[in-house]
Amino acid sequence: MPAPACKDDWKELVNEIAAAEMRTWVASQTDHGGRLAEYRRINGAHGLAEYLSHNGLRIHHRRNIAAVRTQATSYIAAHAQHRQGPLFGAAAEYRHRYCTRNSCAGRCLLDDTCHVMLRCPAHAADRQAMVVAVDDALGRAAARLGVNHSVRSLRDAASDNERLRLLLGSPPYRHLCNGSEEYGEVLRASADFISAVHRTRWLGR
């Protein structure tokens, strides 16, 4: 242990202990699921997310995507029901934060990012408009490469997590990075869908 008079040594030791405890806590939260685990899955590789640097987006596009990525929306139960609120009522454990839309009520469906972006029937029409725009952009991006790229539509992604990363600004495909015009269209379509979800769930409640 450092000598009592060595403040800098004590500060370094405390920082090391705090950092180790934070790493342990993050690992435990990721292992047990929940909001942090979902964020880690969406974020994918470390570094600046593509949606933050893409020139084809306006501030409101980035804001919409960021709110969903960081589990900070008031209209998705898995994000908001860690405390009591006007939309979902009493606080609940993560695994019990169910979708309350009429089409899902009573079915015990976790109202998480995947459910909202890819599955919830309450947003089927808006989702279909997003998918059409996304598929068109992905198809043109693949054609521009001059090869038969395996991902020419949203359904071609290997998993739901890859679909979420694609829609929320951390694309798992290299050809969509570095300011791709087509990927800008994907992100705008996703941000517009998120706006529609907000209107349906929050403004229309």
Image (spheres, helix red, strand yellow):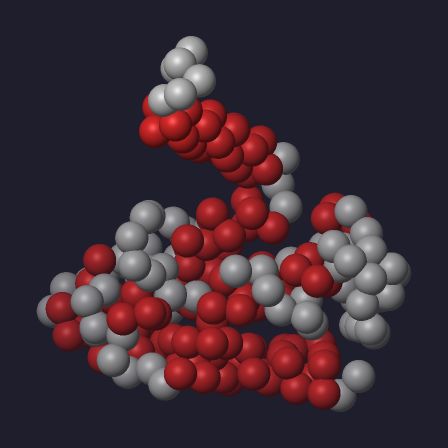
User: Which residue corresponds to the image point at 68% horizontal and 70% vertical from the top-left?
Assistant: 74
Left or right of residue 150, residue 157 in this image: right
Q: Residue furthest top?
A: 1
Q: Count of labels shown? A: 0
- Estimate the x, y position of residue 7 in percent, counting from the top left: 39, 27
Foreground of the two, 108 or 42: 42
Whether residue 134 is visible to the viewer of this picture, yes or no, is no
In the image, residue 114 above or below residue 139: above
Q: Is residue 87 visible?
A: yes
Q: Residue at x 78, y 47 (%)?
A: 93
User: Where residue 190 sits: x, y (%)?
Assistant: 46, 76
The quarter of the displayed image where residue 4 is located: top left
Identify which residue is drawn at 29% across, 53% down: 47
Q: Where does the N terminus fall, quadrant-wise?
A: top left
Front-most of residues 128 and 55: 55
Residue at the extreme front of the image, as rendered? 5
Which of 96/134 is in front? 96
Whole-percent x and y of residue 48?
30, 59
Dividing the picture into quadrants, the one containing residue 153 is bottom left
Whether residue 30 sits left or right of residue 79 in the image: it is left
Residue 17's place in the image compared with 179, above or below, is above
Residue 10 image point, x, y percent: 41, 24
Q: Residue at x 56, y 33 (%)?
A: 25
Q: Is residue 131 above or below residue 145?
A: below
Instruction: Tell me if residue 163 comes above or below residue 6 in the rendering.
Output: below
